[in-house]
Amino acid sequence: MEKSEVKNYKIKNKKTLNQQVYESLKQMLLDNIFEVGQKLNETDIAEALGVSATPVRETFRRLATEGFLEVIPYKGVYVKEFSEKELIEVYECRQALEKLALELAMPNISEDEIDNLIEEIEENTKINDIDSNVDMSNKLHNFIVEKSGNKRLKKLIGNLNDVLIRDRNISASDKIRRKEILEEHLNILNALKEKNLEQAKKYLQDHIKKGCYYIINKKKIN
């Protein structure tokens, strides 16, 4: 960890100090500032963020309960690496929650909205750009969750996606998998356009399962 990198996450706003430290350190983890398995030093992070050690210590505990960090007694705090079993469990939860979101969202989605998304994805398949492809992928999933109208469901899915984001970046770096993801999204949207909820849910389920096993296999290779 370079202190110059961490300066970008320095505390600036007027939220409670504990919340600011939590949000900054969590964003650092999501941005892959630290490596998986890396030991985090409470004093170094506190100094880099310009705060005392106390809110950093509290943040370590909070992020450990959320699955980002692992606290090992008498050894320290480490960036957590998920086991295969843990990854499968998280993806299973995501699958169940997103299928529910799709079911709730379907009555609220217009044909024009579906057509616009299909057009965007078809254009996006022509672009060989990681950030653009990832943004498009996130846009579809976020759209479905928003259209569900269920705030608690949105929060639960958001928490799961935060945990998975580092692994989902692995898929983003694979040109072939990125193209497959966009095609899988088109299948979901076309089923929605045909008002075929069960088919849309099946496509969504297969899409999430395929993503899960892609990540697991990549981790085994590496």
Image (cartoon, grey):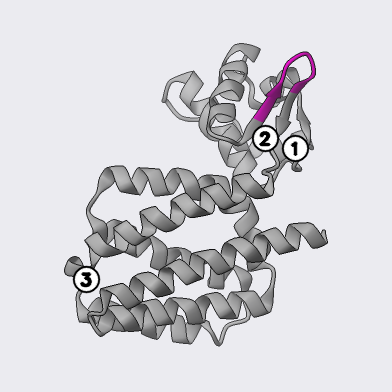
Q: Amino acid at mark 3?
A: Ile
Tell me the SS state at disc 3: loop
Give whichever of 30, 161 is nearer the camera.
161
Give whichever of 117, 159 is nearer the camera.
159
Residue positioned most to the right: 222
Labels 1 and 3: the sequence-earlier one: 1
Residue at mark 2 to residue at mark 3: CA–CA distance: 42 Å
Q: Are marks 1 and 3 in contact (CB under 8 Å)?
A: no
Q: Are marks 1 and 2 in contact (CB under 8 Å)?
A: yes
Q: Position of residue 139 (x, y in %)?
A: 41, 66
Q: Residues within 10 Å of mark 1 (few under 14, many from 20)?
A: few
- Residue drawn 54% across the image and 71% down it: 132
Of the 4 image quadrants, the one containing the N terminus is top right
Query: Which residues are the magenta region?
Result: 70-76
The numbered dot on residue 7 is 2
Of the 4 image quadrants, the one containing the C terminus is bottom right
Residue 31 left/right relative to 75: left
Instruction: Count the marks.
Output: 3
Q: Position of residue 85 (x, y in %)?
A: 63, 47
Q: Amino acid at mark 2?
A: Lys
Asked whether residue 74 is in view, the answer is yes
Asked whether residue 136 is in view, the answer is no
Labels 2 and 3: the sequence-earlier one: 2
- Residue drawn 75% across the image and 37% down it: 4
Q: Position of residue 120 (x, y in %)?
A: 41, 81
Q: Which residue is mark 1?
A: 4
- Residue 218, relative to residue 73: is it above or below? below
Q: Which residue is mark 3?
A: 109
Q: Quadrant of residue 75?
A: top right
